[in-house]
Amino acid sequence: MSVSVRFDDIYKDFGPVRVLHGVSFELPPGRIYGVLGENGAGKSTLMKILSGYEHASAGEIRLDDRLVSFKSSRQAEGEGVVLIHQEFNLAEHLSVAQNIFLGHEQRKGWLLDDRAMRQQAARYLKQVGLVINPDTPVRNLIVAEKQLVEIARALSRHARVLIMDEPTATLTPTETRRLFELMRQLKADGVTLVYISHKLDEIEAITDEIVVMRDGRFITRAPTDSLTRQQMANLMVGRELSDMFPEKTPPASAAPVALAVSGLSVPGWSADISFTVRAGEILGFAGLVGAGRTETFEGLLGLRKRSAGTVSMSGQPVTLNTPQQAVKLGVTYLSEDRKGKGLHVSMGLAQNLTMLMLEHYAHPLLDLQAERAAMAHAKDEFGIRTGNLAARARSLSGGNQQKLALAKFLHPDPRVIILDEPTRGVDVGAKRDIYFQIHALAQQGRAVIVISSELIELIGLCHRVAVMRAGQLQTTLGMDQLTEEELIAHATGTH
Amino acid sequence: MQPALTDTPRRSARWLARIQAVGPLIGLIILCLAGTALNRDFATVDNMMNVLTRTAFIGIIAVGMTFVIISGGIDLSVGSMAALIAGSMIVLMNKLAGSGMAPMLIVLLGMVLALILGALFGLMHGLLITKGRIEPFIVTLGTLGIFRAVLTWLADGGALTLDDSLNNLYGPVYYASLLGVPVPIWVFLIMAAGGALILNRTAFGRHVQAIGSNEQVARYAAIRVDVVKIVTYIFLGLCVGVATVLYVPRLGSATPTTGLLWELEAIAAVVVGGTALKGGEGRVIGTVIGAILLSVINNILNLTSIISVYLNAAVQGAVIIVVAFLQRGRRND
Amino acid sequence: MKRFTLGLSAGVLALAALMTSPARAADPVTLGVSIPTADHGFTGGIVWWANEAKKDLEKAHPGLKIIVKTAANAPEQANQLQDLVTVNKINALVIFPYESASLTQPVAQVKKKGVYVTVVDRGLTDTSAQDAYVAGDNTAFGKLPAEYIAKKLNGKGNIVALRGIPTTLDNERFDAFSGVLKAHPDIKILDAKYANWNRDDAFKVTQDYLTRFKNIDAIWAADDDMAVGVLKAIDQAKRTDIKIVFGGAGSKGMVKTILDDSNKLIQADVSYSPKFIYDAVKLTAEARLKGEALPATTIIPSVLITKENAKQFYFPNSPF
């Protein structure tokens, strides 16, 4: 049942933009392949073509030497080619079980066989290690759980070729480990797996062979164990990558406290959270998914109901109950959910950039010229790569969208900026850009708060890291205490 | 054998995009050509003015409706609201007519009342929808019934007719012309231009689009979502008020059939004009063209007898669908 | 079909003389009146006249109780019939049905319970479901204007007509109208379009008629509400070729115009007064109080209204 995949001279044009330039390579059956490349390298597009979500402009795909051309993802799934999306493809209002069988419902005569579907759904959920009632509506799940449901759904399709696009971006280390076990088991069953990730340590841990793409072209392939992570990164970027993180410059000990939060409680998520962050300081927030970090800050900004807590800025008590007040006070928050909360993907780039401070451009008519100028400036400052500044945000690649989102929430020139998973789904090159950008923000005297699930990131970037577990602030670690072991121990409560 | 990145797909894609943007305009032009071919009187200035003048009510309301729909809302009550405002104006003006007040002042007070009522009704909708958290469809379906019932009650089921002397004074607001163009067309133009300016060139307009595009993102971008939504309904209410100010002098009366089905015509004008019913994006100019297009269909049908009168509604329906097809957006967009 | 050509009150008197059924004991009468809600001028008049009947008759007859119910659509009216029978325990019913077909069965059920049923205006599809039928005269509604216009134009001229909403009622009127004009080959009906018994639509349709036809002698507006819109459109276009605008139904405003001679275009109208609901209630109530029956069909005649007789048709308190 193993199946090989061969790409022959695949081209893909989106309107006037060519994103794939004659890609050819073969994936022999029953192995795990890591596909590496920066955002915009064309790997997601190639995999979407393979799985029927997009059509190639030219070129051929063969499964076991048989020419195939899928008109739809449904047809591809019928042949056992299943893609797990980078973005979720779940119907929010349906239950987990209904989602797993969406489009492939099991029937008993004319009626849906809910019972059988529920039972099988429970089995798949167990396989991916998600302890949850299959009747739970998907909208009640957190991001990581949704990701696991996506994987369970792929399992239900009996995939022979399983493509995973950044499946671990939202998963905790434990969940990731369980996913890897599952992948190895699938490989043993003869499934061909394609694994796309920016996390080179994961690529190293799970794949047998890597394929590198750059700028819409196939670059090279090599057995995974023949390369170091540094070599992989260099291959991706096509140049030597110096250190990922800038040199840390601790804030002056006399730097004033920019933001002090005391006794903040968000019902159902966190209780009695107190912390301070000084001007020029980068404060990290670590914790497992569900520890309440995001919710705490949403509560702080007035985006979520909070039951207690006082806030002062530069020593003065302030009223901070709505996002509008926050912007006025110079506090902005970049959400982890880029498309759901961060950017208006169907609106233009400049419109997104200026959204938080339109009043600055309105006198009283909006100065479209000034907006365009600001966008051109932001493009250079943040290194947003796009050929067309009049395009909509959805036309940008993930990393460039993230840079735009960062630019948007920095546009009001905040004194305190809170960045929630600032590098999620972003490639190595863009990640490095963002790290240097964050460093520069602190250098300019802003207080920066970084919420991240990537420990390396927190360790490399932050002056102090606060660790949350189950809605409580466990501890705050200083620069000299920052190690992965220490952070995990506090986050999991095994200290 | 690298395939050339030909111009063909690009050009056709652009051509298609352009068609979508000007679809309603093309539809309108084709209709006008057809109208002229069927009856030479169609292309006369008088007929144009007639059509544009009668479009003014629906058109002005549709401008306000464009904002509400772009923000992701809907208002089904506008026709009933216009009827109730018209009735209330007439009742007030007739009452004052007996009081010896200067007639000009009475008419002005009537107009002011129309605008105040429109704004108040809009505010009520906005509050029920945002603070009361009731679906706009339901809120305005409810008020659709309420407004019309109250008018019917005011009129005892019959007609409310404006005092003759006031009507003569007020009449020019509908019937007079300025530089050869009837007053309602001027007002329509001003409202449309103002609407387009507000939508495209003010922070409020941008916020309306942002909310319709993705309410959550708008909230995270520190937009006062509730306030903006309420203002869109108030703006629509004001548009209804303005339309009613122009409507009352036309017949000098309000009946329980006043403004019947205006809501559907206004919504159709907005959607035919290229605004997505699910919100997020739209164009005021498209709405204006959409509204004119709907009137022109009726006008042509009235000017000819080639189709059985029983089939008039079918022709209208078919034209609407064809125009909507011309300007449809890409589904995956 | 029996037709009364005298005035209404004469008709009532004649009816009283016709009542022949043997008198039962004068039981108290509970009479239900089921009518459409006031959604345009005419139904507004129906509601007003029904309530007038209740007021006048309950005062005159202590043993009489009248319950007026309005319904916004046919199913609602059917439900109301059930309520009237089971809750209000009526023993007589006067109903102005929303639609003929869909209310035939519900009315038959009511009759089966022993309630005396008088149907007004729109006949049921099965006449055995009713005891008596009282209606306006739709044929005369179309015939009288045609005759009037033909006479005034001396058998020669161009006419445009408006129609209401596509219904049998509208068809009857229009067929009667065009039927008469067939006898006048020099009178041409240029077009007849629907304007939904609505002032605004009539205004628009007339505007377009005026654009399209450069020479019009008379406009049959077919309804007084629509005539209001027609007159405004003529005013606006400043057309002087039109000599006659003929409405229909004898609304207060039109009758007043005729009475005062305030518009030279409006010289006549045809009566089709919502007052027939008043007459129907009155006839039914008085007959039932005596235990008598009504004739199977009573047509309330439509009469040509001119300056001479307009006074009889002017009810300043009615909303219509």
Image (cartoon, rainbow, N blue to C red):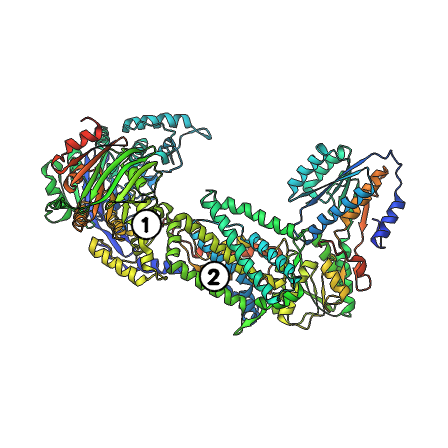
Q: Residue furthest bottom?
A: B179
At horizontal 36% and vertical 34% (from top left) the residue drawn is A140
Q: Which residue is drawn at 18% across and 31% down?
A: A488
Left or right of B215 on screen, residue A230: left
Where's residue B220, x and y in %?
33, 46
- Residue ID for mark 1: A345
For residue B168, what is the image quadrant? bottom right
| Residue C206 rendering spot, x and y as whole percentages | 63, 64
Q: Where is residue A20 in the image (x, y as percent from the top left)?
A: 23, 50
Identify the residue at horizontal 53%, vertical 58% (top origin). Answer: B115
Badge 1 and badge 2 in a common chain: no
Q: Residue A237 carries which label?
A: none
Q: Label 2: chain? A: B
Q: Which of C240 and C88 is in front in this view?
A: C88
Secondary structure at numbered mark 2: helix
Residue A374 position within the rendered picture, expressed as x and y whole percent measured from the top left: 26, 59
Q: Which amino acid does label 2 sit on?
A: Val
Q: What residue type is labelled 1?
A: Val
Q: Distance between the residues labelled 1 and 2?
A: 27 Å
For disc 1, the neighbor class at 10 Å (few under 14, some 14 to 19, many from 20) is many
* Residue identified by numbered label 2: B288
Q: Nearer the viewer, residue C21 or A254?
A: A254
Q: Could you tell me which chain the residue with mark 1 belongs to?
A: A
Element type at mark 1: loop
Q: Report if the CB atoms under discs 1 and 2 are less than 8 Å apart.
A: no
Q: In this view, does A175 lie above or below A57?
A: above
Which quadrant would the N terminus of chain B be assigned to in this image? bottom left
Residue A352 can be seen, yes or no:
yes
